[in-house]
Image (spheres, coloured by chain):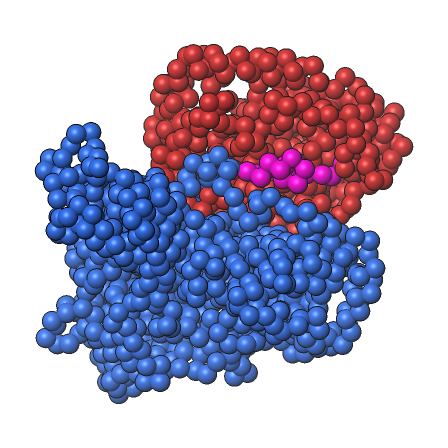
Chain colours: A blue, B red
């Protein structure tokens, strides 16, 4: 029985392309649900009967022995159902993802203000919170190390210091034509996902648990809960449909909260929910590492770097968490886009008595780039050239560079460098040279307002540097009505991953995306997943889903060829249906026939990234599959009387490979840029001398608001196919654009530098708050030996 | 009589007993399972919980976006509460604000989105009502400035705001130009019905609501208020709740007795009397803004940098005084303008220069039985007055000032300083005048030498604190520079000194 569609035959098909496939700006799959409030986040799920609410009591000391923890009054408080502390953990009292050292509950020792001491489960969160305050706790304070400088002075590290080294940096520094030394402090950053951390635990039979967690890493939640309870992984099933933002803050951190909910449910047999309020979230969870980076650079009269030595020290906090890989990535990106012939990079991973810092979009890379971009600007001012010229002569060379200026400090050859082209395109689009001249003119004509301009590049390595994480799985069912159930190990935090992966599947089958059901990530569908991190979500899971689709297509093709007695080569999936020889069969009809023919319509798909390897001992290898590139020009105006500023215009050219969804990729570029700008401008984490975080809510911690968005913002995606065989030749886009925000930071420095006619670098530390900017203005005015009065010609 | 009545969407809610400090957000999420409204910060700073309150004003519905996390449910008496669940049409079509956001790719994680939608919805609805006053076409720059003000209280961590602004341009244009008339009529029919319902539930008398030992009193007149205060001295006086809300959500305080000022018509006055602008205790910033800007044009940028739309829609000018904060933005301005306040109690009243109200940190000149009935600001004398106000903060929009400054100078015919009132916030434990600096200006010629010498006296006036907002060094340096800037702006108006986008605002 042949069923051609609308009388069309295969011969008439002109390989029409499905409109919601790869390359289309399909809307985010949840867009309608977002705007109507119908998208369900973990706290929105219907609450089960008997639900308990959990509050975490926290340390008020940065470093102390707990000499008394009397919880009798807490337990006796009406409405309290359970109080859980270290001794109530049947398995391992630790949620360290890679290395132990992150206690679920402090056991005799606290190492940061905010550390979890015990948990109270009650009928209402207000009851739990009130009861927790009744605990009798005595501490014996110990000396606390709060800052990176404290830790360096005390040789306090969470992990051993690491070094990359090539050539003879010391010798070449000594004989360099010119040389400068300096240091920069780079502040941390709170993720400030709008949805704070949350976990919901439901009891099942046999002591099994179902955990809903706002997490980028469901498998880690599964492992951790199993470890904490002392049960096998199969007893724990973790689900996440979507997060209200992640940015790296929900990679390792949610395990603490899921574990505590699991413990409460384990002990009480009742469902439990742990939702942090904003202040607790910001106090308890880790952030982007702040750094102190020292540099010593030698260069020629053109500004070409001859030798450079970096010493980077980061505040890891009280435990290692992911700090090893994060600091490694700083080392991998201290070169950013520049060839460093004689180089040494020393990386200290400092232990302090503050929250354990963690993953955040860019994962240590951005801090390295800020440092080298500072160095480039300082060189430019010293040799009296436009910083852009100095950037360009230091860029990595082409793949076939005869001088070999294309090998990174970790001995990976850069074969896909497109920064010269991107830079040229951006210079033209942004009218760089003319605007540089206009800005100098403006600065000559204006006494109080000063403008600055900076073009900074990004070269960001794509792959997990922990090689084993570069794998992904997918599960795909085609139901007998032709609808497709899609599942994979990636999680949706707003980045549009689910939409992009669905587009890839739509592309393979040439079906409309509406036919594909996007489903929540759960550990019982796809096991042993990697975190959705390192920008890898689509590269890995998209390819795994594609492989699943290819398997099913193969079965369907084979079936169709046999069923219709045609050559398999004539079976093609098109937007109108499946061509089989000279017939056109509707997709759902073919599926139905395959079902009746007892063809399996379900499969898994798997992918592992090729070509990558790295030897941590020697510091050599090929840790990245490829690099993603981009560059931005930012123009700012600074009020040199107050230090306040505005970003006036931003132009970006960013490399997405062959974009799977240009609208979503543009959103990542724009959002990433603004987040990077916020990190380096108004977002200031302030710890007091006792280690208390004083900026722990939006009233005190200032992420960019609507008005901070530059009025002119031109974003151009460069969609040249990836030279490597990534999924549909696309490129990862989650993290790289964040570092485009460095251009704002450098432009602010540039504006202030105009006060001393670009002879001195203002050396503003990050974030460049209005305070730091004004203080730098005052410093430069003094350096110019112009009394402030001289500036005023009233 | 002692029943809280309000409309939730079109549903009439009547509650006999309500916890006085139950927030609208917790009511919506915990009791009504309206989970579209999100908690992002519980302190009115992120806007994820934005809902809209509709009230009848001059026989029309007026819509206000507010932060549900710090509005107490009891204050909704006689009002309509609209949440994101109320926006789709009966035929399940998205509201134009929602549809524009979908079309512009304006959501990523989506958690902040309902809040943006509701901020936009309030603006859209109010805009529709102005259709009979057909607005002038506005430049893209002006529309963008306006939208950034509409959304200044909504934080988004994913998008970078661009697509949200783009969507805003679309729905603003729709509201103003291409809205089909019949849709407006249908809307008006629904609104007429709402107006009728709201009129039927307007509170007619004072109300008292209690639950679990906590009491909420909503007096309907000033005497009823002073009587209640006389009986319950020290009760918490609630107006906009933009500070008191945080006592509950952040400090987790239990407030035994709350007296709400919002039910007293007499406290909603904004009027000119005896050469003074008088603003009553229940007047919100949004309500006071047009009059403040009309009479004190220099305040425009300052007031739009002050908090956010949601906060200005709830917070009151008098509340900003009453709580005694050293970093409130209005007291320095009002002190520089020589404002005074009226303190009223049962059977009596006294007037006090505002600067005398602030005694020390956490201590004000108000008796437990008194309340601040109004603030009165002398209008500017037309001649020879120089004034300006400045706000310095880490972030330009919606941030608490590290320093705020208000300068008022009167010159005589010889261009000598006849009067100088320079008041700063963030420089001391209270909003405080720079008396030594003022002395250095008085009876001196208004010139650079005088002003710069006087500015250096600020170090004698203030020893500011270092905290997470700013260091003492910065506070002092910026205070000095602000006075210099004030002079520069007076003397060299052609010199560019402003980085902000001012002018051409399309507010009323």
**A528 horizontally vs A111: left or right:** left
The answer to which of B455 and A428 lies nearer the viewer is: A428
From this view, report whether residue A25 is shown above or below residue A138. above
User: What is the x, y in percent for residue A699?
Assistant: 58, 49
Q: Which region shows up in magenta?
A: B20-37
User: What is the x, y in percent for residue B493?
Assistant: 40, 36
- Location of residue A64 (image quadrant): bottom right
- Location of residue B407 (image quadrant): top right
The answer to which of A273 and A193 lies nearer the viewer is: A273
Check the image and name the residue furthest to the right.
B231
Q: Magenta span has A556?
A: no
Query: What residue appears at the point 74 percent right and 50 percent down from the top-left corner?
Result: A123
Number of numbered discs present? 0
User: What is the x, y in percent for residue B43?
Assistant: 62, 45
**A19 horizontally vs B501: left or right:** left
Query: What residue appears at the point 21 percent right and 74 percent down from the top-left corner?
Result: A413
**A441 horizontally vs A76: left or right:** left
Query: What residue appears at the point 51 percent right and 13 percent down from the top-left corner?
Result: B188
From this view, report whether residue A317 is shown above or below residue A500. below
From this view, report whether residue A344 is shown above or below residue B121. below
The answer to which of B242 and B480 lies nearer the viewer is: B242
User: What is the x, y in percent for residue B245?
Assistant: 68, 41
**B439 horizontally vs B370: left or right:** left
Query: What residue appears at the point 27 percent right and 57 percent down from the top-left corner?
Result: A551
- Residue B465 shows up from this direction: no
Q: Quadrant of the N terminus of chain B?
A: top right
- Residue B108 shows up from this direction: yes
């Amino acid at each position: 029985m042949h069923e051609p569609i609308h009388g069309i035959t295969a011969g008439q098909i002109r390989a029409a392309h499905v409109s919601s496939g790869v390359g289309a700006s399909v809307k985010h799959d949840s867009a309608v649900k977002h705007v109507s409030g119908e998208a369900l986040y973990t706290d929105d799920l219907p609450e089960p009967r008997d639900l308990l609410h959990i509050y975490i009591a926290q340390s008020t000391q940065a470093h102390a022995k707990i000499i008394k923890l009397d919880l009798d009054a807490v337990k006796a408080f009406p409405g309290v159902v359970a109080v859980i502390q270290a001794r109530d953990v049947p398995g391992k009292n630790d949620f360290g993802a890679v290395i132990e050292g992150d206690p679920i509950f402090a056991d005799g020792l606290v190492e940061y203000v905010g550390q979890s001491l015990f948990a109270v489960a009650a009928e209402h969160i207000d009851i739990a919170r009130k009861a927790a305050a009744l605990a009798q706790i005595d501490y014996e304070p110990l000396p606390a190390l709060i800052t990176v400088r404290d830790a360096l002075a005390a040789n306090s590290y969470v992990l051993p210091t690491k070094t990359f080294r090539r050539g003879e940096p010391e010798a070449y520094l000594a004989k360099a034509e010119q040389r400068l030394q300096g240091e920069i402090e780079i502040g941390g950053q709170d993720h400030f996902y709008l949805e704070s951390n949350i976990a919901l635990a439901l009891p099942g039979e046999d002591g099994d648990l179902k955990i809903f967690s706002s997490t980028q890493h469901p498998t880690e939640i599964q492992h951790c809960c199993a470890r904490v309870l002392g049960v096998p992984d199969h007893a724990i099933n973790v689900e996440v449909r979507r997060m209200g933002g992640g940015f790296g803050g929900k990679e390792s951190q949610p395990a603490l909260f899921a574990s505590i909910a699991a413990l409460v449910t384990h002990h009480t047999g009742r469902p439990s929910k742990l939702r942090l309020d904003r202040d607790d979230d910001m106090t308890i969870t880790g952030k982007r590492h702040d750094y102190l980076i020292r540099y010593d650079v030698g260069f020629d009269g053109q500004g070409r770097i001859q030798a450079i030595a970096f010493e980077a020290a980061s505040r890891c906090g009280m435990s290692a968490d992911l700090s090893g890989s994060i600091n490694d990535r700083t080392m991998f990106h201290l070169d950013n886009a520049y060839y460093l012939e004689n180089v040494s990079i020393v990386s200290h991973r400092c232990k302090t008595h503050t929250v354990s810092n963690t993953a955040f979009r860019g994962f240590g890379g951005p801090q390295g780039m800020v440092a080298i971009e500072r160095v480039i600007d300082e060189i430019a001012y010293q040799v009296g050239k436009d910083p852009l010229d100095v950037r360009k002569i230091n860029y990595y060379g082409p793949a076939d560079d005869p001088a070999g200026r294309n090998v990174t400090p970790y001995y990976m050859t850069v074969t896909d460098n497109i920064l010269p082209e991107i830079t040229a395109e951006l210079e033209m689009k942004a009218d760089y040279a003319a605007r540089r001249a206009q800005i100098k003119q403006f600065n000559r004509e204006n006494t109080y307002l000063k403008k600055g301009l900076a073009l900074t590049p990004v070269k960001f390595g794509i792959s997990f540097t922990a090689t084993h994480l570069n794998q992904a799985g997918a599960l795909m069912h085609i139901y007998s009505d032709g609808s497709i159930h899609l599942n994979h190990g990636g999680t949706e935090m707003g980045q549009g991953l689910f939409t992009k992966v669905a587009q890839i599947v739509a592309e393979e089958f040439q079906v409309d995306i509406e036919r594909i059901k996007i489903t929540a990530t759960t550990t019982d569908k796809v096991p042993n997943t990697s975190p959705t991190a390192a920008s890898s979500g689509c590269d890995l899971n998209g390819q795994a889903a594609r492989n699943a689709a290819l398997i099913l297509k193969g079965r369907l093709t084979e079936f169709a060829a046999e069923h219709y007695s045609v050559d398999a080569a004539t079976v093609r999936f098109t937007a109108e249906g499946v061509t089989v020889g000279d017939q056109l069969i509707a997709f759902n009809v073919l599926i139905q026939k395959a079902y009746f023919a007892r063809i399996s319509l379900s499969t898994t798909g798997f992918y592992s990234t090729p070509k990558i390897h790295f030897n941590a001992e020697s510091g050599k290898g090929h840790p990245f599959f490829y690099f993603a590139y981009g560059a931005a020009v930012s123009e700012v105006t600074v009020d040199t009387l107050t230090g306040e500023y505005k970003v006036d215009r931003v132009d970006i050219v960013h490399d997405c490979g062959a974009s799977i969804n240009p609208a979503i990729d543009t959103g990542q570029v724009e959002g990433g840029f603004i987040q990077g700008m916020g990190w380096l401008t108004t977002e200031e984490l302030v710890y007091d001398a006792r280690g208390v975080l004083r900026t722990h809510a939006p009233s005190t911690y200032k992420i960019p608001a609507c008005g901070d968005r530059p009025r002119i913002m031109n974003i151009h995606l460069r969609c040249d196919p990836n030279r490597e065989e990534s999924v549909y030749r696309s490129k990862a886009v989650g993290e790289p654009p964040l570092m485009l925000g460095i251009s704002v930071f450098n432009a602010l420095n540039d504006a202030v530098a105009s006060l001393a006619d670009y002879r001195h670098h203002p050396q503003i530390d990050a974030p460049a708050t209005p305070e730091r900017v004004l203080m730098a203005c005052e410093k430069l005015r003094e350096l110019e030996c112009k009394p402030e009065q001289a500036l005023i010609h009233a | 009589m002692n029943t809280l009545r309000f409309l939730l969407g079109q549903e009439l809610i009547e509650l006999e007993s309500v916890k006085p400090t139950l927030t609208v957000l917790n009511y919506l999420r915990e009791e009504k399972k309206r989970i579209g409204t999100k908690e992002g910060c519980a302190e009115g700073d992120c806007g994820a919980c934005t809902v809209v309150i509709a009230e009848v004003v001059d026989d029309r519905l007026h819509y206000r976006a507010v932060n549900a996390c710090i509005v107490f449910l009891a204050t909704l008496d006689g009002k309509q509460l609209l949440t994101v669940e109320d926006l789709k049409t009966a035929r399940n079509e998205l509201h134009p604000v929602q549809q524009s956001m979908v079309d512009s790719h304006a959501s990523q994680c989506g958690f902040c989105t309902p809040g943006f939608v509701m901020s936009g919805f309030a603006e859209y609805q109010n805009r529709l009502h102005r259709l009979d006053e057909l607005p002038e076409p506005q430049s893209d720059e002006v529309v963008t400035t306006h939208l950034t003000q509409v959304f200044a209280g909504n934080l988004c961590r994913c998008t970078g705001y661009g697509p949200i602004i783009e969507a805003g341009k679309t729905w603003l244009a729709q509201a103003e130009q291409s809205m089909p008339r019949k849709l407006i009529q249908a809307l008006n029919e629904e609104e007429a019905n709402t107006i009728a319902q709201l009129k039927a539930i307007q509170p007619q008398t004072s109300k008292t609501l209690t639950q679990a030992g906590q009491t909420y009193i909503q007096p309907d007149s000033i005497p009823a208020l002073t009587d209640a205060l006389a009986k319950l001295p020290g009760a918490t006086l609630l107006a906009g709740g933009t500070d008191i809300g945080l006592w509950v959500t952040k400090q987790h305080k239990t407030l035994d007795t709350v007296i709400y000022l919002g039910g007293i018509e007499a406290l909603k006055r904004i009027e000119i009397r005896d050469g003074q602008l008088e603003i009553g205790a229940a007047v919100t910033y949004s309500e006071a803004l047009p009059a403040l800007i009309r009479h004190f044009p220099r305040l425009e940028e300052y007031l739009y940098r002050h908090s956010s739309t949601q906060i200005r829609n709830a917070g009151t000018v008098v509340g900003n005084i009453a709580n005694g904060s050293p970093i409130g933005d209005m007291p320095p301005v009002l002190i520089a303008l020589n404002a005074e306040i009226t303190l009223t109690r049962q059977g009596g009243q006294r007037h006090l220069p505002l600067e005398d109200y602030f005694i020390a940190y956490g201590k004000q000149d108000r008796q437990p039985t008194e309340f601040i009935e109004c603030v009165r600001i002398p209008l500017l004398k037309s001649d020879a007055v120089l004034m300006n106000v400045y706000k310095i903060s880490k972030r330009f929009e919606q941030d608490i000032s590290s320093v705020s400054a208000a300068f008022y100078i009167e010159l005589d015919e010889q261009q000598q300083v006849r009067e100088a009132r320079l008041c700063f916030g963030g420089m001391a434990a209270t909003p405080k005048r720079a008396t030594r600096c003022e002395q250095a200006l008085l009876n001196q010629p208004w010139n650079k030498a005088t002003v710069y010498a006087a500015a250096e006296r600020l170090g004698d006036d203030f020893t500011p604190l270092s905290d997470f907002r700013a260091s003492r060094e910065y506070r002092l340096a910026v205070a000095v520079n602000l006075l210099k800037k004030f002079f520069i702006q007076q003397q060299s108006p052609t010199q560019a000194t402003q980085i902000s986008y001012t002018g051409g605002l399309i507010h009323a």
